[in-house]
Structure formats: C-alpha cells, structure tokens
C-alpha cells in the first residue's frame, strides 16, 4: 500500500512555513531530521512610492519644457541687452561662491538693481499689474519674468476656448448634476452587493432650491461644514455629507471610512482638494478601493468648484487676478502690522517666538511663510499649514 503524505503551508507576506505530515497527521522524520521549517524573505513593496516619483518627474519635466520654449522666444532679444541674464537666473539658487557668474545680483546688474526692482515690485503680481495697466515701454527682462511666472504656475483655467465668467455657473451646475448621477449609480451598485444597504444613505443634493448657487458662494467663503450640510439638505449618515460636504469644507475624506465600504477593512486612504499632486494621488489610491473609483475621479471636479469660488472671492469687484493679489498683499501687510503691535503691547516676551524663531513643531509666523531673518541673513524653512498657524 502506498504511503500518503500531506504538505501543509503557511504563507505570509514575508515568510512561508511548511510541514510534511503522514496519513495520521504526524510530522515525517527521516535520518534524524523532521520535515518542517520556515523560509524568510523581505516583504514585497508596492509601487506607490515609485509612481509618486514618476508623477512628480513628469510634472516638473513639463514645466521645464514650457520654460525652455519661452526662453527660446526671448533669448535673442534679451541677449542683445544682457547676455548673462539667463545664466544669472540659473545661478540664483546657488551660494555666491558656487555661481558661474560672479555678479552679486540675480536679475538686474547695472544702475537699476534687484534691490530697486523689489522696492518697486514687492511681488510678481505688482509687476504683472503694472505691465497690464501702464502705457509705457518696459524692460524686456521684466516682460519675460511676468510671462515666466504665468506659464510656470499655469493654474486651473488655462484651457483653450474657456473664459472665466463671474456670473456663469454652468460649470458648477454641471458638476452638481454629475455628482447626483454618481450617487444614483452607486446606489444601484451597492443595492445589489451590500446586505446592509440603506437607501437613505444615497440621498441627493437638492440643487433646485431658490438661490442655491448664490447661497453656495456665501457659504464657501467660510467653508462652514454645518452650513454646507444645511444648504445641501442632507443628514450626517449620507454619502453627500461624508464625502462631498467634508471635502468642500476643506477637509480630507477618509475613503475607507465611508459607510458603504467601511466593513471591508480597506487600507486607509485620505484625500482632499489641498492634497499635493492631487491628480497623481488619485491615480495611485483609487486602485485600493475600486468600488469607489468614480468618487476618486470626481475629486478633480470638486477642486474645480473650490477653485472657482476661491477665485470669485478674491476677485470681488476686480477683473484681473494681479489686482486681487496685490490687494491681498496689502491686506496681509496691514494685518501683520496690527498683529505685531498687539503682541508687542500685551506679550512682548513672546515676540521672537511668534515671528522669528524657527523650531521644530513651532507653528509660528516664520514657519507659516517659510522664512525668517537671523543676523541680517534670510533663512528659509518648510511651511506649516494655515490651520496649524491659526490654532
């Protein structure tokens, strides 16, 4: 009679255990050895990190290509008035001793210097505003710097044939209709697959309310979560609240904790409109919860809604972004002066801690703007978020 053996395997993420058993479930032994053991190896890693690197490389390469094309257009004419201009720009990130061009200034060198330029134009938006509104001949290098800024950070409205109109909410209306369609679609899908299906969870946004979109503009100025919920007319335990309201109010949504997939114990996935490299993150993360791929993709639409109302808010009665940004700069400067006077008057011993010191986990003004001055030397650092600075 043939002997029967059983091979038992315990397969893990970084090991495989094995044992050979006879027909009576006893470990097999031969020549003094018991036939069981474990094989250890390094745990496999997903490609998330590498995908992130690739996505960032593509974004940076596209930016470099745009700037290279712009330089080609300007290089001949700028070379006639300042042949080292582009070399100085390339050297601007280096210390003085490491620069190929030994000139102290990065932008302008003789007569009119960088110091004069920044006194005249504290921000690039001051220059852009002057270029648009002043009827005079500008230095070609200034024209280049303004256009360079526009194409480097090209924004969300650089789409051929599209024009931003303050009174036109067609794009916003289409996004809300699309989201209601998505909710209906998910309702059908989960009704068939979820034994705990709750139809109330898939309540729709009532966009037919009187003054819905004008009220939405007012609420989004303050990103008040409760006011948004009230405007949308939904309860807490709804997809609209857990996903749309939370993201619109500036928070991140934990996709793995949405009620319709919470029981599946997915890996944590957090995304919001402020997430760095959002498009790349969406592509990385949505494969973790394939049932919600349509919600991951809709994040880009929510970002368009947030950006639309943000731009509407800062423009107010203005037609130019540069006008709005110059006003923001002035308001920031005035608010900062008030804040500094307040601290000096009531907490003078805390002044350096609030505005100058750079310490780990100290979310002060220096950390908020990512820069401070120490002994007349400018030191740059990472930024803390606006919420961290406020609280």
Image (tube, rainbow, N blue to C red):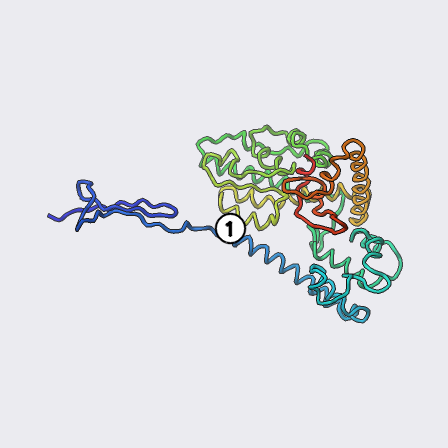
Foreground residue among 56 and 323 = 56
Q: In this view, does 371 lie to the left or right of 201?
A: right
Label 1 Cα neighbours within 10 Å, binned few <14 / some 14-19 / many ≥20? few
Q: Residue at x 70, y 54 (%)?
A: 154
Q: Residue at x 53, y 54 (%)?
A: 51
Is 93 situated above or below 328? below
Can see residue 17?
A: yes
As drawn, the residue found furthest toward the left would be 1
**SS class, disc 1:** helix
Can see residue 170?
A: no
Horizontal and vertical percent for residue 204? 59, 33
Foreground residue among 365 and 247 = 365
The quadrant where residue 61 appears: bottom right
Q: Is residue 30 left or right of residue 166?
A: left
The quadrant where residue 182 appears: top right
Horizontal and vertical percent for residue 286? 52, 46
The quadrant where residue 81 appears: bottom right
């Amino acid at each position: 009679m043939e002997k029967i053996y059983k091979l038992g395997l315990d397969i893990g993420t970084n090991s495989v255990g094995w044992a050979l058993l006879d027909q009576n479930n006893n470990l097999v032994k031969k020549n003094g050895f018991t036939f069981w053991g474990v094989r250890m190896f390094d745990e496999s890693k997903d490609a998330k990190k590498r995908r992130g690197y690739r996505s960032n490389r593509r974004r940076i390469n596209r930016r470099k290509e745009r700037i290279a094309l712009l330089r080609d257009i300007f290089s001949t004419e700028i070379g006639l008035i300042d042949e080292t201009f582009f070399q100085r720009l390339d050297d601007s990130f280096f210390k003085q001793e490491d620069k190929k061009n030994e000139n102290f200034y990065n932008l302008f060198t003789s007569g009119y210097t960088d110091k004069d330029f920044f006194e005249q134009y504290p921000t690039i938006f001051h220059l852009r505003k002057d270029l648009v509104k002043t009827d005079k001949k500008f230095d070609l290098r200034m024209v280049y710097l303004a256009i360079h800024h526009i194409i480097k950070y090209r924004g969300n409205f650089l789409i051929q044939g599209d024009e931003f109109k303050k009174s036109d909410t067609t794009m916003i209306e289409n996004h809300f209709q699309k989201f209601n369609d998505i909710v209906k679609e998910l309702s059908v899908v989960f009704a068939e697959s979820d034994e705990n299906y709750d139809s109330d969870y898939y309540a729709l946004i009532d966009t037919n309310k009187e003054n819905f979109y004008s009220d939405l503009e007012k609420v989004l100025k303050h990103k008040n979560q409760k006011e948004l919920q009230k405007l949308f007319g939904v309860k807490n335990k709804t997809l609209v609240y857990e996903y749309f309201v939370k993201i619109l109010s500036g928070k991140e949504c934990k996709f793995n904790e949405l009620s319709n997939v919470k029981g599946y114990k997915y890996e944590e996935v957090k995304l919001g409109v402020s997430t760095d490299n959002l498009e790349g993150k969406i592509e990385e993360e949505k494969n973790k919860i394939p049932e919600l791929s349509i919600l991951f993709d809709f994040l880009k639409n929510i970002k368009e809604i947030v950006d639309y109302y943000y731009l509407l808010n800062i423009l107010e009665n203005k037609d130019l972004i540069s006008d709005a940004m110059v006003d923001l700069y002035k308001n920031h400067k005035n608010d900062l002066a008030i804040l500094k006077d307040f601290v000096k008057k009531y907490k003078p011993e805390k002044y350096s801690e609030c505005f100058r010191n750079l310490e780990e986990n100290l979310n002060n003004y220096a950390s908020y703007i990512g820069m401070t001055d120490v002994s007349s030397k400018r030191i740059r650092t990472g930024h803390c978020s606006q919420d961290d600075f406020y609280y």
